Image (spheres, rainbow, N blue to C red):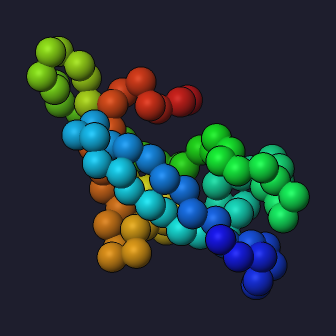
Amino acid sequence: MDDEPWPGVVEVQFTDAAGRCWSLFDKAPVFDAMGELGPDSTFPVEVAVTCVVAEGHGLPEDEEAVTVSTSPHGVATSDGREEFTVRRDQLIH
């Protein structure tokens, strides 16, 4: 989104278990522990968002979903939302 202030601010988008697209905004290092995001990066780039599992439940057709919170690093949507229900296969360990 912007290189000022340094480090730059990026927008991360993901789709939840219901198919809704969400945007999270924060400085690049919050989403990129390896330091690969920068002004010369070619976007879009896959990144990870640190989260904690809040609860799990079933979805139609026996797909598993889990509610997660992005609170460990204080990452939230522009309106302050930090809990999302995502597919279990979206999570990495």
Q: Is residue 18 visible?
A: yes
Which quarter shows the N terminus?
Answer: bottom right
Q: What residue do we see at 22% from left, 40% from top?
A: 18
Q: What residue do we see at 26% from left, 30% from top?
A: 65
Q: From the viewer's perspective, is residue 87 above or below residue 13?
A: above
Q: Is residue 66 visible?
A: no
Side of 83 relative to 40 (left or right): left
Residue at the top extreme of this rendering? 62
Please count the marks in the image.
Answer: 0
Query: Where is residue 61 drawn, in percent x and y?
Result: 15, 15
Q: What residue do we see at 65% from left, 60% from top?
A: 30
Query: Where is residue 28 drawn, in percent x and y?
Result: 70, 63
Which quarter shows the C terminus?
Answer: top right
Query: Where is residue 40 drawn, in percent x and y?
Result: 87, 58
Q: From the viewer's perspective, is residue 32 above or below residue 2?
A: above
Q: From the viewer's perspective, is residue 68 above or below residue 77?
A: above
Res 80 → quadrant:
bottom left
Res 27 → quadrant:
bottom right
Q: What residue do we see at 28% from left, 41% from top?
A: 19
Is 42 in front, or is 27? 42
